[in-house]
Amino acid sequence: MGSVVLYKSMSLDGFVAGPDIGAEHPMGKGGMRLHEWMFTDHPDPRDKEVIAATFASVGAVVVGKRTFDVGLPHWQDTPYPAPTFVLTHQARDELPMKSATFTFVTDGVEAALKSAQDAADDKDVIVMGAQTGRQFLRAGLLDELQINLVPVVLGAGTRLLDDLGHIELERTQVIASNAVTHLRFRVVR
């Protein structure tokens, strides 16, 4: 079985999205700056390697409903070419897309994780969304965090690591490019 990995780009002041998230600003105002390193015309080879390694490792994805709602119009597909499970309180039929299918899970994070692990086989389950990431951390369900630290201070928005209590992490990887520092941590249990 693969790892359960929270994959997030983050500002130096701990924000993973800017303020006022919505259809017009799916990453909040100024939040798209956190992903510029992925979508530049001339990406750093180190960043390309991190992206390629992530895509190669993904077997399934768990996202929160808000991430689904604001992301789908921009993705026009699942966020990775893998089965994607949406944590929600509202039941809904599966949504087939070009690369994979969205499945809506109403039974909580443990049920979403079980479904994702079953679909992922021996590959990783990627967790997306700040609130969903916090739920997985609080429940002790994450194995690793991949933080892509972007050299910007957003000043406001959505923080990833608020209100979690004490969690020990062990740094397992650092890859620095000119645009971002990729930090990988193992959750110490």
Image: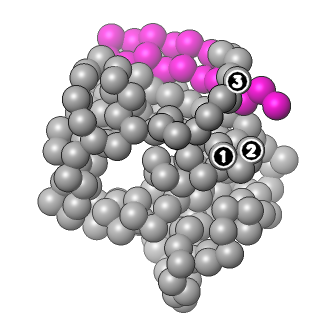
At a point 49% along the width and 62% down the height, the residue shown is 64
Q: Where does the image place residue 8, in percent across and percent down from the top left? A: 47, 37
Q: Is residue 72 magenta?
A: no
* Label 3–label 1 contact, CB within 8 A: no
* Label 2–label 3 contact, CB within 8 A: no
**Mark 1 residue type:** Arg
At a point 56% along the width and 46% down the height, the residue shown is 134
Q: Residues within 10 Å of mark 2 (few under 14, many from 20)?
A: few
The reply to whether residue 146 is visible in this rendering is: yes
Quadrant of residue 142 within the rendered picture: top right
Residue nearest the observer in this picture, 45 or 91: 91
Q: Where does the image place residue 54, in percent across and percent down from the top left? A: 57, 37
Q: Residues within 10 Å of mark 3 (few under 14, many from 20)?
A: few
Q: Taking 181 as reference, is 156 above or below it?
A: below
Q: Residues within 10 Å of mark 1 (few under 14, many from 20)?
A: some
Q: Where does the image place residue 143, in percent across and percent down from the top left? A: 73, 37
Residue bearing the label numbered 3 = 168
Q: Mark 3 to mark 1: distance in Å?
A: 12 Å
Q: How is the image coloured?
A: one colour
Residue bearing the label numbered 2 = 140
Q: What secondary structure is marked by label 3?
A: loop
**Mark 2 residue type:** Gly
Image quarter of the C terminus: top right
* Label 2–label 1 contact, CB within 8 A: yes
Q: Which mark is residue 138?
A: 1
At a point 43% along the width and 16% down the height, the residue shown is 181
Instruction: Read off the magenta span.
Output: 173-189
Q: Where does the image place residue 179, in percent across and percent down from the top left? A: 32, 17
Q: Is residue 175 magenta?
A: yes
Q: Mark 2 to mark 1: distance in Å?
A: 5 Å
The reply to whether residue 186 is visible in this rendering is: no
Quadrant of residue 71 within the rendered picture: bottom left
